[in-house]
Image (cartoon, rainbow, N blue to C red):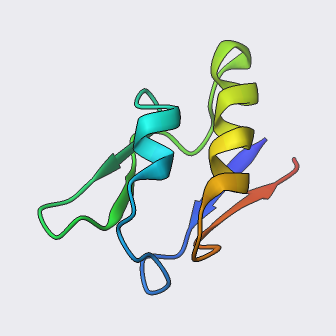
Amino acid sequence: MRIKADTNLCVGSGQCVLTEPAVFDQDDDGIVALLTDHPDDQRAAPARHAVTLCPSRALSILQE
């Protein structure tokens, strides 16, 4: 699984960071920053959940 973040869509709500801080972070402007775009098995489920919580739909999951 690979996560894609569209920083142009991000509104900085921070739901992703609150849900899975090992995968998501925010820059100084509050915009999403990926710490990894390939979360390990332990982080995959929380990362998927974080994607569903994104209010601006800035996050997506790509299967590989």
Vertical relation: 9 (above or below) 55: below
Relative side of 38 to 25, left or right: right
- Residue 14: horizontal and vertical position, in percent? 38, 54
| 51 is higher (above) or lower (below) than 22 | below
Which residue is rendered at x = 76% and y = 27% of the image? Answer: 45
**Nearer to me, 63 or 26:** 26
Lateral position of residue 17 relative to residue 51, left or right: left
Q: Residue at x 88, y 50 (%)?
A: 63
Q: Give the farthest residue toward the top.
A: 42
Whole-percent x, y for residue 9 in the image:
50, 84
Closer to the camera in the image, 21 or 13: 13
Total marks drawn?
0
Residue shown at 44% from the left, 75% from the top: 10
Farthest-out residue, right: 63
Q: Quadrant of residue 13?
A: bottom left
Q: What is the residue that sits farthest to the bottom in this orientation?
A: 8
Residue 41 position, x and y percent, is 74, 17
User: Residue sitting at 65 percent across and 54 percent down?
Assistant: 53
